[in-house]
Amino acid sequence: MIDVEAADGQELQTVLNRHVKSEQCLRLARNSVVKCAVREDQLGDEKSVHALLVPEGVRLDLNGSTLLLDLRSNSYGVRLSNDSAIGNGTIRVVNSAGKGSQACWHAAINVGAAYGDGGTPAKPGRFAKVSHWTIENMTIDQQVAASAIQIMSEACHGTIRNVRILDSDKALLGIGLDWGSVGPITSADAEIPRMRRLWEQGEIYSTHPHDILIENIRIGRLLRNVDANDAGIRCSACHNITIRDVEIEAAATAVAIFGGDLGYEFAPADQRDLEHSGYRVENVRIGTAFRFGMVLNGLADNIWRSRKAFGYDAVRDPAHPGINKPVFRRVTLSGNAAPGSQGIYAVAVTAAQLDQFDVTGFGIGVHVEDWVRGMQFRNARIKSNQKNTQVEGATEPAVGVVFE
């Protein structure tokens, strides 16, 4: 343990940089307040724009301190590296100006690389893959239109534990996990055939968060309510994700699991067969869900539309298996009786197990649509909804939906 003092973010960054790959824990002076402005650091031949970078092989113990992030342009907040950690303090985003639309820009904590920031297959970016990282015992105060914590690209073998996310009118997400890109990927429907050619030529591939534990999370009232993406926790094109012991006071959606624009169509060979598998969600409760309690949508929608509109010959079925063999246990979803609200909305799901569910106060309690092949509900209390269950489908109706 090395005790450090820092008057500002620049001084703190200088100290952190001295200990790169040291496997040391640096501990801030107790109850410090450190303002971190945006800076640009040169990492080899790559630049990173952020408020603070925790270097490889360093653990930062905030020791009850608060980091105040003053963020401008497209910049990351506190950025983690391989084999790094941050814990025991508070991060507050106090200013945000000039950011783009990606939820990672101006997030309080970032792991991974933004879309377009992942380098090339010949030379992947330093943050296209970030492994063995930890976020623990943190409070996040995010009052701007960004995620509180954003995980991107192939961020993997990581832990987010004992985190409190405060009330916010503007935050896009509590915790977001999103696929990323290496090379010039676009997900526009009409461009998918060209992406296939680039992928076959080794000029692009997609990256996917995986093997991540999210546990003991407390989220306040997230009042942004535009669509299902405004969630306490959202995953897009990930695998081997465990989410447990989560309490959310209010949000548009508690937990959303998506297949992503491209699914695993252009994923690396060692990950392709793992698409959307290994989800385990346990002990989740939301006090008020404005739109959805939980969304399970495994469709690679841009691939599906490109196949339909442009005759694209897909490498992988964009609808099957979708979210593959997820396991959910002890989940309580409460709505506010808003018209159109849904406790569970499911599309493109295979062999889901759902045990000990309590779903009340929605327009529809459980709504299962196309491309679902098996959802088994056990010990479910689905009541006091305008309609408790609705199983249907216009393209490929759901089959194997059982309530025991």
Image (tube, rainbow, N blue to C red):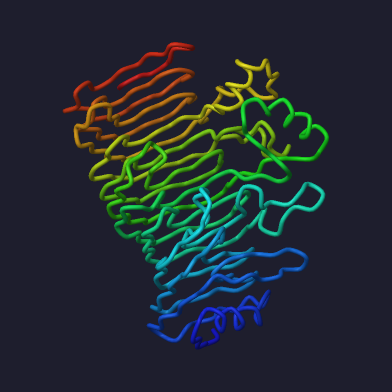
Q: Position of residue 32 (x, y in %)?
A: 41, 83
Q: Residue at x 52, y 64 (%)?
A: 72
Q: Is residue 105 above or below residue 384?
A: below
Residue 161 or residue 80, whichever sits in front:
80
Quadrant of residue 268 in the image? top right
Question: Which residue ends up furthest to the front in the rendered image?
Answer: 98
- Classify the position of the C terminus by image quarter: top left
Q: Residue at x 70, y 24 (%)?
A: 315
Q: Position of residue 100 (x, y in %)?
A: 53, 51
Q: Position of residue 288 (x, y in %)?
A: 24, 43
The count of marks equals 0
Residue 273 or residue 71, whichever sits in front:
71
- Classify the position of the N terminus by image quarter: bottom right
Residue 221 in view here: yes
Quadrant of residue 39 in the image? bottom right
Residue 137 in view here: no
In the rendered structure, the answer to whether residue 229 lies left or right of residue 181 reads left
Q: Position of residue 252 (x, y in %)?
A: 32, 41
Q: Residue at x 42, y 69 (%)?
A: 91
In the rendered structure, the answer to whether residue 103 lies left or right of residue 379 reads right
Q: Residue at x 52, y 73 (%)?
A: 37
Question: Which residue ends up furthest to the left in the rendered image?
Answer: 384
Q: Is residue 324 above or below residue 285?
A: above
